[in-house]
Amino acid sequence: MAKTELSARFHGLDEARRALRARFEEKLLATPSLADTGPQGEGPPNRHGMPREPPGQNVFERRAWPVLDLGRIPAVAPEEWRLSVDGAVEEPLTLRYADLLALPQVDEEADFHCVTGWSILDLVFRGVRFEWIAALARPTPEATHVMTYGSDGYSTNLPLEEALKPDVLVVHSAEGKHLSPEHGGPVRIVVPQLWAWKGAKWASRIEFLTHDRRGYWEIRGYSNTAYPWRDDRNW
């Protein structure tokens, strides 16, 4: 996007974000990480006297962050990166890397749970809250879900009440360093309260949907809901 066009969209952005959050607040509060009893969600507040990790998981050290993908690591330079945001939205847009950095930045300490049996706790991610990008695009009243895509052909789906949680980030850095290509750089999506496959590496497109549609792993038998603390791995 041109700098002037992006700046113009900032006007009223926080109001749009708040309205979007209010629209999905009831569903958001009913999600398992907020509504279930016991250890739910992610991060240190959920671990006082509780297990550190969901059932069936082993905690890995940060330096042992494994690399999992579909067998191809796209080579996308930051200056060439683009993120298309379209579908059931009033204001489709395409973000460049510089546009992403121009949006409000946050540092989020979050857990990372992989369905293959390992977890890494308290990773520090830097990026933009997904809800800000949603507010820029202004989902239509009919929008209920979102599909995120990677440059490697990957896709994964989310209900908007999960995608709009404040710890869901469009990430460009982890542990104080730019994301490496192996870990989804230059930009990936992180959804800490769900299994890690629900966040696309090498993010290239966000499509807002008026109904649920399953992504790459979901159509191959992985859980459509993906709640780690419910041990929710497969159908």
Image: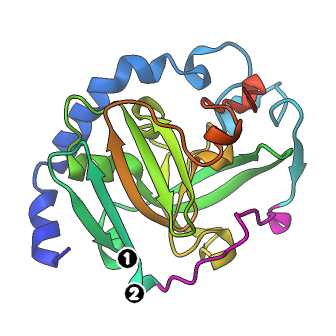
Please identify the dominant SS of the magenta region: loop
Q: Which residue is mark 1?
A: 97
Separation of disc 1 and disc 2 at Cα? 6 Å
- Provide the secondary structure element on which disc 1 rests: helix
Residue 82 drawn at (x, y percent): 36, 73
Quarter holding the N terminus? bottom left
**Which residue is at 33% across, 43% downward?**
208
Instruction: First in sequence, mark 1 or 2: give its number.
Output: 2
Q: Is residue 64 magenta?
A: yes
The image's colouring method is rainbow
Q: In the rendered structure, which segment of residues is drawn in magenta?
A: 62-77
Residue located 40% across and 42% down the image: 146
Amino acid of disc 1: Tyr
Q: Which mark is residue 224?
A: none
Residue located beneath label 2 in the image: 79
Q: Is residue 230 visible?
A: yes
Residue 102 seen in this snapshot: no
- Asked if labels 2 and 1 touch by Cβ distance under 8 angstroms, the answer is yes
* 92 on left or right of 66: left
Up-down relation of residue 139 to residue 169 (above or below): above
Left or right: 188, with 36 as reference point? left
Residue located farthest toward the front when viewing the structure as drawn:
220
Q: Amino acid at mark 2?
A: Glu
How many residues crowd around disc 2 within 10 Å: few (fewer than 14), some, or many (20 or more)?
few
Q: Is residue 229 above or below residue 102?
A: above
* Quarter of the rendering containing residue 143: top left
Q: Residues within 10 Å of mark 1 (few under 14, many from 20)?
A: some
Q: Residue at x 65, y 45 (%)?
A: 217
